[in-house]
Image (spheres, rainbow, N blue to C red):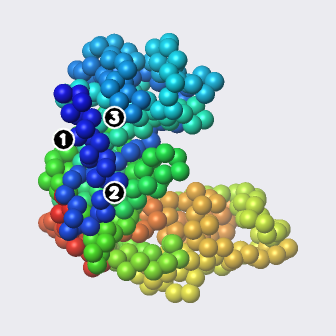
Amino acid sequence: MAQCKRILMSLIFFASVFIPLHRTNASLQPELTVGIMSERHIVTVTGRNTVLYVHRTLEDDPFLIVPMGEKLVVEEKSGAFWVNGTEQKSDRLIVQPSGSGFVEVDGSPYRGYITLFKKAGMTVVNNVLIEDYLYGVVPKEMPASWRSEALRAQSVAARTFALKNRGRHRADGYDLCNTPECQVYEGMNAEAKASTDAVDATHGEVLFYQGEIADALFHTDSGGMTESSENVWGSYVPYLRAVPEARAQTLPWNRSITSALFVQKIESTGRKIGNLKEIKLSCLQIGNGKGDRSHAGRVLTMRIIGDKGNVVLGGNKIRSLFALPSTLFNVRMQKSTVEFNGYGSGHGLGMSQWGAEAFAERGKNYKEILRYYYTGVSVEKLY
């Protein structure tokens, strides 16, 4: 049975790597490799309701079988693997469950199986089918208590993003990380019935634009209007266009920074400004930007004037320097502080998650929500 399982997983992996992802020829559900730990020197793996098979490669028979309820302790010492106290001459280890069991890594359960390889210690990778991966992603990216149509829209967007960005961390030895840089993923600990139902209801559905998988970016809340790609990335993407939200001026926020710290942060960019004299930025009008603002109202450039020099910085640079939630803001100089007041959270590209929930509340279904936020896309069954 274990040998059959290894053959099946190998075929799935082969399909996911070598079959191009076009709706006309992809029929098998792809497998993803997700980095869940790095630079570790000791990892404890157990089976949940299963024995564990430990291999050097998927093609080899297991060199160790860990009985149900017992621990597998893997250490990296001096560039070598030590498995339950015995050195193993291998560059990587593969740990598979049997039957319908699951692998637990340091107490956290994961679907699929685990690969460990040596890199600055050990890197731990979860090899997992994409639908199983989404069970652990969707409830971390959107509250499982939200309306089902919003959760379905999130499921399709997350599936599309994962497939489009597969291989993003190839240099690190896996497809995707488990942080917000890719998508937050916490395996089975994150799973919730409502989000799992949403994933199942949209099984295999992906966003396409003119025959290619779209880059389905999403963000927390646009604040009133999403953004066009060129104003964030600097390049035109036809399906990432600014669109107005169901609600405006959402998620208001405020940040206060001392003038001294403001100057220090600005001068860290390499330009001397001295004492702060003036900040030039037009007033925020959502959907009516001009000059130093995009049409959506986000800051494109801001001019800072001091007694020793001036500097013009982009909105994304300002957001990064001061850890602002978004580039949709006004700014005011006070006596000894600089005050930022804005709306929304995130880069503003693609689907607004709070906006999706608002549209779901108004009766829109998930396909309508997706087609609203991603201009000109189609929702297609990939597998």
Q: Where, by quadrant of the figure, is residue 309 drawn?
A: bottom right
Looking at the image, is mark 3 or mark 2 nearer the viewer?
A: 3
Looking at the image, is mark 3 or mark 1 nearer the viewer?
A: 3
Which residue matches tag 1?
193
- Left/right of residue 136 with respect to residue 228 in the rendered view: left
Q: Where's residue 150, x and y in %?
A: 23, 58
Pointers 3 and 2 in contact (C-beta within 8 Å): no
- Left/right of residue 318 with respect to residue 227 in the rendered view: right
Name the foreground residue: 180 vs 97: 97
- Tell me the crowding category of disc 3: few under 14, some 14 to 19, or many 20 or more residues within 10 angstroms, Cα based: few
Give the residue at x 25% y 38%: 7
Q: Earlier in the sequence, mark 3 or mark 2?
A: 2
**What is the C-alpha distance between the residues marked 3 and 2?**
18 Å
- Tell me the crowding category of disc 1: few under 14, some 14 to 19, or many 20 or more residues within 10 angstroms, Cα based: few
Q: Earlier in the sequence, mark 3 or mark 1?
A: 3
Amino acid bearing label 2: Phe
Name the foreground residue: 326 vs 171: 171
Q: Is residue 107 visible?
A: no
Q: Where's residue 155, x and y in %?
A: 25, 55
Q: Where, by quadrant of the figure, is residue 4 drawn?
A: top left
Disc 1 secondary structure class: helix
Which residue matches tag 3?
59
